[in-house]
Image (spheres, rainbow, N blue to C red):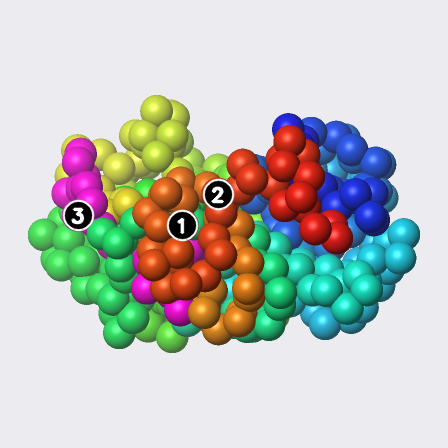
Amino acid sequence: MTTKGLYCPAGQFYIDPSRAVERAVVTHAHSDHARKGSQQYYCVDSGISLLKSRIGKNISVSQYAYGEVFEINGVQISFHPAGHILGSSQVRLELNGEVWVASGDYKREKDPTCEPFEVVTCDVFVTEATFGTPGFTWNANADLGQEILNWWKQNASRGYNSVVFAYSLGKTQRILGELFPLTDKPIYCHPSATEINECYRAHGVPMAATRCLSRVEPDRVLTGELFIVPQSFMNTEHAELLGRKYLTAFASGWMAQRSGGYDHGFLMSDHADWNDLVRTILETKAKKVFVQHRGKGALVKHLKSLGIAAFPDSDLFPKNPDQLSLF
Ligand SMILES: [Zn+2]
Ligand SMILES: [Zn+2]
């Protein structure tokens, strides 16, 4: 790992580099993973339209199906579903019989809008740990679509609009996918989500009907409607459509610990919770695990207590070249 991101010296490529590089293998289109300016991108075919809509139509990109093996400078590479958003991938690397997997962002919960997570056995697993502390657990049996529909109906019956704050890429489409079998009523979406919704629909992902806020006449006030918007929406002129009677909710894994400032919270994450992180790491059968993102302290400690050689991702820096092993 370098300051530009995860680097494979044998193959001379980066995974999700934080800056422009020669060869960028990209796990998914979120902005902290896919960045502009690299000479050559590599990604899974179902993620390509999202990648282009986020970082540019004219990028040079090689696309592969899940499981298809290709080579960069002798390193064998394949993408495997991560269950995070449409086209999200884990990256499997193989060289001289040793296998590394970089997870990217992932979750194990069901999500009607993306390919389900696939367990890939490996020698070394580089895992994300956005929610890598024991307090973060999701209810695997929750019916989030029904919960959102019930809240919306209840608010509408009192003459209130319902505003669900959600990221434009991933969470918004997941909510629309969950609502698809439950309602025919169109849902108001922010313009930042409209092109992304179209990418999902073009891939055949069924989602509830939507109406783009940019198409609504500005002097109207709506009643009893559902809005799925980023939080910045409240500072835009479109927010006047809500009138005075509206209630807000945030759909996020962070709702496990705080609910501040919202009328309601939906515990809905596109990342693995604590239990699923631990379960997934065990299922990969990795002998060595590197932990990325927040919460790595708790997870590294817990894995060590289970007898797994676990390290924070800072140990992937070249100052510890012995940790780099083959890659
Ligand atoms: Zn992500
Ligand atoms: Zn991320």
Query: Which range of residues does the magenta coloring cover?
Result: 256-279
Give the residue displayed 41% in from the left and 63% down from the top: 307
Give the residue displayed 55% in from the left and 66% down from the top: 286
Q: CA distance from mark 1 to mark 2?
A: 7 Å
* Disc 2: which residue: 312
Residue 106: give x, y in percent of width and height: 49, 58
On whether residue 269 falls in the magenta region, the answer is yes
Residue ranking furthest to the right: 73
Nearer the camera: disc 3 or disc 2:
2
Work out whether residue 178 or residue 134 is closer to the camera in this orientation and state it. 134
Q: Circle 3: is it few (<14), some (14-19), or many (20+) Cα within 10 Å?
A: some
Give the residue displayed 17% in from the left and 48% down from the top: 264
Work out whether residue 158 or residue 38 is closer to the camera in this orientation and state it. 38
Mark 2 element type: strand
Asked whether, in this view, residue 101 is left or right of residue 59, the answer is left
Amino acid type, residue under disc 1 in the picture: Val
The answer to whether marks 1 and 2 mark residues whose Cβ atoms lie closer than 8 Å is yes
Say which label, 3 or 2, has the lower sequence index.
3
Give the residue displayed 81% in from the left and 64% down from the top: 96
Mark 3 element type: strand
On whether residue 57 falls in the magenta region, the answer is no
**On residue 264, which mark appears?**
3
* Disc 1: which residue: 300
* Residue 225 in view of the camera: no
